[in-house]
Amino acid sequence: MLGRVSLLPKSVARRSISSRRHASTKTIRDALEEVIPAKQARLKQLKTEHGQTVIGDIKVEHVVGGMRGLKAMLWESSVLDPMEGIRFHGLSIPECQKVLPAAPGGKEIIAESMLWLLMTSKTPTEAETRQLSRELAERGELPEYVVQLIDSLPQSLHPMTQLGMGVAALNKESKFAAAYERGIKKTEYWTYTLEDSMNLLARLPALAARIYRNVYNPGKPIPGVNKDLDLVGNYVNMLGYGSNHDLTEYLRLYIALHGDHEGGNASAHTAHLVGSTLSDPYLAYSAALFALAGPLHGLANQEVLRWQLNMQKEIGDNVSHDDIKEFLWRTLQSGQVVPGYGHGVLRSPDPRFMALQKFCETRPELLKDPVIQLVKKTYDVAPGVLKEHGKTKNPYPNVDAASGCVLYHYGLTQFKYYTVIFGVSRALGCLTQLVWARALGLPIERPKSLSMDVIDTLVKSP
Ligand code: CMX
């Protein structure tokens, strides 16, 4: 069985989160305070003892090839192995699914338990997870000026543009920016960054749901934040699908799994770079969202569904493996990429893709869905075609190959919106990094760029 069964007996799980709060339960801030000094000491030691130790070469192909594989960034919360996929503080996805608490009445891991793990490197208890859900829900309402801003935007403006604008506008509320202006010590930066990060995370569901309502269901009432629900439970409720338990569980899993993918990917790196200037978390994360909005990165999940639906429209429901091969070749020969395949680091099928496939395998109604069947059949043949094509270093699916089709099945069919869901998720990792960058006192990023003349000179006399 996929996922983790709630440790609570059903009768207890049904009780509200608030009724199970304990004054003694540790908050995420308490947990961070406990682990920060040891990490600070470790970094200090690393700099002192190994500051000049060489751990890699820089080749011209790094400079002109998007820095692929260049080891040049500290990112603690997760590490991506090309063959094995992502590990969050050393835990693989199946291990996370065994140890991280689910929502009351649910089985899948949730954003809160993943956030706790990313931030603190520890597995939260059930009580700590519930308290974090409560804390986020209490912070979850949008300020009125942001509601007005979002409501004033044209319906035709891409949902990702709206999300980025809404997140940037929230910076009026920034505790970090206000404290910095007042004058604070460097050692205090992380506490205000954490405060902003929690507020931003908490408000993302209401912001993202309002964008969905305005673009696709104008005028429909949106429920308020329910203090007894987890972050994604609230999000799905505000999107208008709260009664769909399976969709809620799917989005819990998807948002938790997609929350962090080490630091070099475009959105994570953007958040870190912008944050390194001491921009507040709202500005840093809004910049990350605009990186996420590119079709080679986060927009791929919208592109996958568009591409699969075009395939279905062209070939019909009764699709054979040979039909798919032919369609794949036509895509490649027209000079387009096959969305959902390939990766900058991974060299094997993405374990996040596999986890989402497993979710489908436990639900017969999903297995019968023609679009989900098409995704599975495409996976059967696409790696072979891409290998034969011979360009991509990784012919296997990434997470985006599977994510959209399940949403489509459950009635969330507006695929231009899918990257917004990714945007709600990726905040987990990006904001964790911002807090740690401040706790560890990481400096402003400033790599050295080179002109071709300089490269010519260097290659002649390295
Ligand atoms: N279909 C066709 N060609 C592909 C390909 C694909 N899925 N993936 C890579 N290639 C091509 C590249 O365009 C490149 O071609 P050129 O030499 O003509 O420029 C060549 O193969 C080598 O690329 P690579 O080193 O294997 O891949 P990169 O690290 O440069 O790019 C990625 C990685 C993800 C942008 C690329 O695989 C791609 O465009 N995939 C499709 C879009 C996608 O699914 N993106 C989502 C990624 C996950 C995420 O970030 O969320």
Image (tube, rainbow, N blue to C red):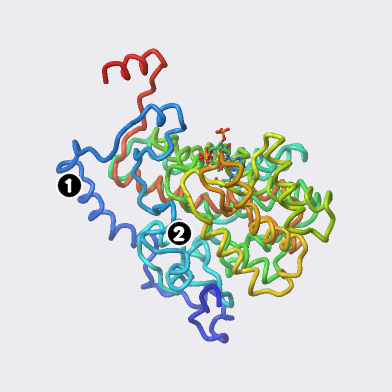
Residue 401 horizontal/vertical position (percent):
63, 53
Residue, disc 1: 45
Which residue is farthest left?
49
Residue 382 horizontal/vertical position (percent):
64, 52
How would you rate the neighbour count of disc 1 (Cα within 10 Å): few for under 14, some for 14-19, many for 20 or more?
few
Q: Amino acid at mark 2?
A: Leu
For residue 13, what is the image quadrant?
A: bottom right
- In the rendered structure, the answer to whether residue 164 lies left or right of residue 449 reads right
Q: Quadrant of ligand 1?
A: top right
- In the rendered structure, the answer to whether residue 426 lies left or right of residue 47 reads right
Residue 152 horizontal/vertical position (percent):
73, 38
- Numbered label attached to residue 442: none
- Disc 2 element: helix
- Please identify the quadrant where the C terminus is shown: top left
- Count of numbered tags: 2
Q: Amino acid at mark 1?
A: Gln
Would you say the residues marked 1 and 2 are in contact, meaning their CB atoms lie under 8 Å apart?
no
Please tell me which residue is depicted at 76% across the width and 55% down the height of the picture.
413
User: Between marks 1 and 2, how big is the CA–CA gap?
Assistant: 27 Å
- Does the beta carbon of the residue at mark 1 sit less than 8 Å from ligand 1? no
For residue 167, what is the image quadrant?
A: top right
Residue, disc 2: 115
- Please identify the quadrant where the N terminus is shown: bottom right
